[in-house]
Structure formats: C-alpha cells, structure tokens
Image (cartoon, grey):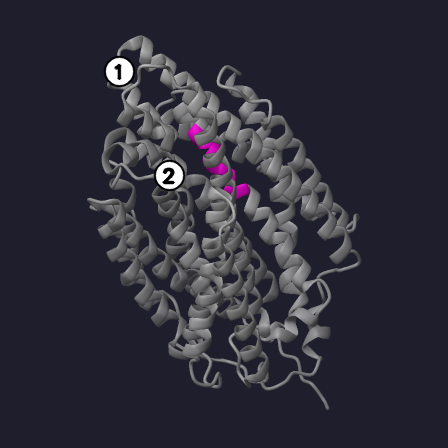
Amino acid sequence: MTTTTTPAPRAGRREWIGLTVLMLPLLLVSMDVSVLYFAVPFISAELRPTATEQLWIFDIYGFVLAGLLITMGALGDRIGRRRLLLIGATAFGAASLLAAYADSTATLIAARALLGVGGATLMPSTLALVRNMFHDAKQRGTAIAVWTATLTGGIAIGPVLSGIMLEHFWWGSIFLINIPAMLMLLLLAPLLVPEFRNPATGRFDLVSAALSLGALLPVIYGIKEMARDGLSPVRVLAIVGGLLVGALFLHRQRTRAYPMVDLRLFRRRGFGGALAVNLLAMFAIVGFAIFTTQHLQLVLGLSPLRAALWSLVPSLAVGGVAPAAAALAHRVERAYLIGAGFGIAAVGFVVLTQVTPETPLWLLLVGASVYAGGLVMVMSLVTELVLGAAPPEQAGVASALTESSSELGGALGMAILGSVGAAVYRREIVDGLPAGLPADAGDAAQETLGGALAVAQGLPAELADAVRHAAGVAFTDGLHLAAYAAVAVMLLGAVTALVALRGVRPADSTALAAEPTGPADASLSSVSR
C-alpha cells in the first residue's frame, strides 16, 4: 500500500478567534468546581445545610460532570459537536440562574446537578472542536496547551472571582457571572466555530449511557457515606452494585462494533497507568483545596476578597513548573519525573500537618505551594502520555477519558477528604465546646465550621470566643488527618508511575497511524462549515 502525505492546512485568524470563543465555556465549567469555596459561610448562614447536604452541594457538580463526559462526547459525534456545545451553553446558563436564586438546599443541589449536565456537554465539545480546527501539529499543540492552561486556570481563578463577588454582592451572584459568557458563546460560536460530526459512529447507545451513570454514582455515594459514618450494609451494597453495573458497561463496550469507549486503548502500554496517575493527582489538588480556603476565611478570619487573593499565591509560585517539567522530560525519563512530582507534593502535605489556628499564614502558603508545584509537574506530563498512547483517530476518546479521570479524581477527593475532615471535626468539637451552650446551638456548631461561627455570632463575647476556638482546633485536626491521607495517596501515585509508566514515551503519530484499526475506529470524520 502506498501512502501519500500532504501538508496539513494551517489555521488562520478565524480559527484563533474561534479558539478564544471556545475558552469561555471551558473557563466557566472549570471555575464552577471551585467557585463555591468562599461562599460556604454565606450559604451556611442562609440555607442552614447539614454537613451531608453541604458536601452534596460541592460534590454533585463533579459527580454528574464526570459521569456524563463520555456519554456527551459520543452524543456530540452523532448530532454535531458545535450543536451540542450550543445546547450545553443554554442549559448551563439556565442552571446558573436557578442556582443564583435557590431558596433551599435541595434547590441548590438540584441546580448544581443541572450545571454538571451542562458542563458535561461543554468540556468534550471544546477539546474535540479544537482538534478539528487546528490540523497542523505545531499549531494544534499550542491550542491544546491553551486549552489545558484555561482548564487549570479556571480552578484557580474560581475562588478569587468568588471572593470579589462576595465582597460586594450576595452569594448567588457567583452563578450569575456565567450567563453573559454563555450568551456571548451562543452569538459567536455559529460564526467562528465549524461544525463537526462523525457520520459512521452507529446509533447512540442509551443503554451504555445509563450504565455509565449507574456504575459511577452508587460507588461515589457508598464511598462518601462510608468515609463519613463508617461501614453499613446499604453503603457496601451501593459500592458492590455500582461495580457490577460497571462490569456490565465494560462487557457492552467489548461486544459492540461502535462502543462509547474502545477498550483496546487500555491494551496500549502506559495508557491506563497514565489515567490512574492523573486521577490521583486531581484527587489531592482538588480535594484538599477546600481545607486551605476555609482555613484562610473561617479559621484566620480573612475577608472573602483577602482570602481569595492569598489563595492565588500557590498558583503564582508554581507558574514555571510546567515548562520546566517539559524541558526536563527531554533528558530525564517521565516516570521518574512524575514520581518526583508526587514526592514533592507529599512533602507539601506533611508541612500542612503542622498548621494550627495560631500558626502564621506563611506556613499554610508554603505547604500549599509545595504540593501544588509537585502536582502541576505530574499533570503537565501525564496528558502528553495519555494522548501519545492513543492512535490519532482515537485521540478524541483519549481526551474524554483524561477529562473523566480528572473530574472523577477531583470529585472523589472532595468527597473522601472532605468527609474525613468532617468526621474528625464532629468528633473533636464535642469535647471542645464550652459548658452552658444551648442545645440547639451546640447541635448547629457540631455540624460544620461555618455553622459554629454562625452560632458564635449570637453569643456573649466570652462564650463566642470559646466556640470559635473549639471549632478552629477541631477543623485543623480534620485538616491534619486529611493531609496524612493525601500523603498516602501521593506515595501510591509515585509507585504507580514508576511501575506503570517506566519506559513509556509519547508515541510517534506516524507510527501509530500505520497500526491496523478495527470497526470501532476505522471511520474518519466529516467537517462542515
């Protein structure tokens, strides 16, 4: 067989402006993972959520988003990725409006779930469209780097923007900022972003879509509840049931000609290991962020804006880590660099075990900067390995799996580390609360740190100080145990990288393109403007 190679067309001004438009929804979707961090005290004061409800307000967005990424990616292939992007933008804007004016905890949780549905349509669509708009390899690499920077930057910017809004407006305003950007996307995307669909993907598999959700959500629920209140038959059955549904999902993917996930990707060396490493990194960096932000605002008593600005210090401190890691990867094997990144992150979490309500702010910032630097090193190298392990025609699926592992890792981190911290808080504060506290006030103080501070506002000065001190000590005790758990996860990540990724390098795209493909990946795509 003779293969003729023609130079890939280079993107022009229209494509680069279109990329800027695509970054709007991506920035907002990533921001919504962290935008609630500084709103916790305001939501606690107005809606009075229980500890479990507070966790669900945070968790449900990431759970739904992670559970639907692959499903929505497959749907976009069939109906058109730009069309799905516009549908998702409409849904995301409507859900933002509902969340902004939620008058109950149940309404806010439901709105966050709908935001997750909208976000799941936006994330895979943006990355897939970037790949379709930039055919030249060098330009595509630059565009994907911009996409990755926007995704991670949104998580860092979310708390800052939240703090600025909370300084001047009510807590629901943090959701209203989504609406103008979504309206701009609806106006500009049809003009600047080409449509793309794959004409040979088979019928959309509703059964697989249901199975993917049925596998994820029970497992997450069981883990979260076990971390909070220990073992119980219902929680164990939820996890076992989810795993069984997951087995059915995998079997269905294995037996269909056009599956949502081509399982042959996992036969490629390093692919599964890189996804696992990515999940562990996101578990720690997202799961622990709530502790640092609440310590700044609730324990140290900083205003939302000051706390938000101080929370940028770790991001600024590690700004040069990703380029440095990429440069080192030309001389040092990536598995060793990734393992070293996990080791650096473990040192940062050890530093955080020394934080108390009385320690200076700089110690918290040093610990957070060190662990963030190590994990940025990990994530900057893993994405390249995942995409390099997949053949070019399946790079979109590989990207969706990378996003899914990131969202799942972040959601698991918030659920498990948050539950660990909450369990320690409730146990420790019982002995620390002063005598003579009204029963209802004591119950509220034992639920969350935000609840304890709200209770203290209505007490005499001496009693209020005692409640604040007890709550601060209980919270930092929970932070310490969560940090030790994060250290264990970092060590697991280092071992996984050294075992599964040693000798793995980003594959040459020409070599991969020459490999035989089967029905699941034989068809290429069509682009229409």
Residue 436 in percent (x, y) is at 31, 14
The residue positioned farthest toward the top in the image shown:
462
- The answer to whether 500 is drawn above or below residue 170 in the figure is below
At 55% across and 54% down in the image, what residue appears? 145
Q: In the image, is 60 to the left or to the right of 343?
A: left
User: Which disc is residue 131 wearing?
Assistant: none
Q: Secondary structure at mark 1?
A: loop
- Give, as a three-letter code, the residue at label 2: Ala
- The answer to whether 400 is drawn above or below residue 295 in the figure is below
Q: Label 1: how many residues lie within 10 Å, few (<14), some (14-19) or many (20+)?
A: some
Quadrant containing the C terminus is bottom left
Mark before the other along the chain sequence, 1 or 2 = 2
Q: In the image, is 375 to the left or to the right of 301?
A: right
Residue 521 in percent (x, y) is at 58, 81
Tell me if residue 129 can be seen.
no
Identify residue for label 2.
51
Magenta residues (range) = 285-294
- The answer to whether 440 is drawn above or below residue 112 in the figure is above
Name the residue nearer the viewer: 325 or 340: 340
Q: Label 2: how many residues lie within 10 Å, few (<14), some (14-19) or many (20+)?
A: many
At 60% across and 43% down in the image, what residue appears? 376
User: Which disc is residue 459 wearing?
Assistant: 1
- Give, as a three-letter code, the residue at label 1: Leu
Q: In the image, is 337 to the left or to the right of 460?
A: right
